Image (cartoon, grey):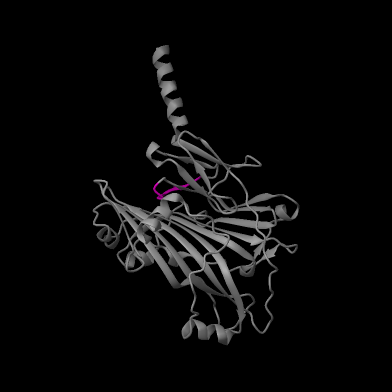
Amino acid sequence: MRLLLSIILSTFFITVCAGSRVIVVDNDSGAPVGSATVFSRSGSILGMTDGDGVFTNVSDRDYPLTVKCLGYLDESCASGCDTVRMIATSYELGEVTVSTAERPILHMICYIREYSGGATSDDTIQSYAEHMADFYIPLTKVKKFKGRYSPRILRSRLYERKTDSSGLDSVYHPDYRRDDISWIDLISLPEKTVNETDGIRSGATSDSVAGKYGIKNILRKTGGTYIENVDHLADKKDHSWSPAIFKLLGMTIEISELRSAWAYQANDSGIYNAADIIYGTFSLDVTGKGRWIKKAFNSSTPIALHSFFEIYPVESEHLTVDEAKDQIKNNPPKVRMTRSPLAPALPASIQSIIDRLTK
């Protein structure tokens, strides 16, 4: 009996050390890093860490892992590691230009990276895209102008990889952005002014705000940066959301993770708006159950879909209301693909897709 128990425990220990469970922590404080996004060796999104910084169900074929989290440098995790230590990053930025009352609309052009994918029992589709998009944000109350907080895509570079059950791997440039994989239209810049919590104002480097059914906001202020991480499903009883509009379109979906995070240039006032954004991320996990999604993937079973976005402002200007309306309706700006200097090097798996298509 003791021998049997010893074998069972040894097997369990070996399994854990082999990497079935990974913990992501802050390198300096040792505090867990929740909502970090974990990528497999192929560049596919595996999911996000929980509030304790834990990610489970990692298989040997997933290594080496890449871990991304706003406010930290990207980190890799080789097979056998069980702890990933994230190093906080800092930014050197210019002065923030304040708009005048006559030009209250902030027109922001952003460089966006999109990592998306879906999987069935037979096929895996992995999508990577670079976009240039713009937003129109009223920095004060403006009559007859609601603003545009979701991205208007101005230019894109699209890449896809498809792998079938036999292991056949192909890469290509899609002719259009696929709405059954891409969820970029769900991105939204913060519409309200963000205020530091009392705890942060009192000198704490981190704080949290409870939602109805879990932690809704995780805040951190270090290195001249104020970071707000938002769990948009914290007020949902089952931590899931099935938007009715998709049901009407025959695209029944269930969103089980929906998070955004924004890094602001810290200031003495402790009050932030879109003009203070350094960069942001947006991530979600979706199960597609509707007939149109199943048809798109040629599958009779639900489809697991994952998306992760990085949003980097690269240019901004202040406009009058009339100028903003004219640009939105008639004269969208002409832009070149401009990679933000804050964007890190791409994971090797994603870079390999690009390299295969540019040879």
| Foreground pick, 292 / 121 | 121
Q: How many marks?
A: 0
Q: Is residue 48 magenta?
A: yes
Residue 269, percent from left and from top: 74, 64
Residue 307, percent from left and from top: 43, 56
Residue 232, percent from left and from top: 51, 57
Q: Taking 238 as reference, is 155 above or below it?
A: below
Q: Is residue 188 left or right of residue 165?
A: right
Q: Is residue 340 magenta?
A: no
**Quadrant of the drawing holding the N terminus:** top left
Q: Taking 328 as reference, is 211 above or below it?
A: above
**Quadrant of the drawing holding the C terminus:** bottom left
User: Residue at (48%, 46%) from the top-left corner?
Assistant: 66
Q: Is residue 267 left or right of residue 190?
A: right
Whether residue 238 is visible, yes or no, is no
Task: Report the span colored magenta.
Answer: 42-49
Residue 125, percent from left and from top: 33, 55
| Foreground pick, 205 / 240 | 205
Q: Is residue 281 left or right of residue 20?
A: right
Whether residue 174 is visible, yes or no, is yes
Q: Taking 2 as reference, is 70 above or below it?
A: below
User: Residue at (40%, 58%) from the top-left corner?
Assistant: 354
Q: Taking 23 as reference, is 315 above or below it?
A: below
| Foreground pick, 241 / 120 | 120
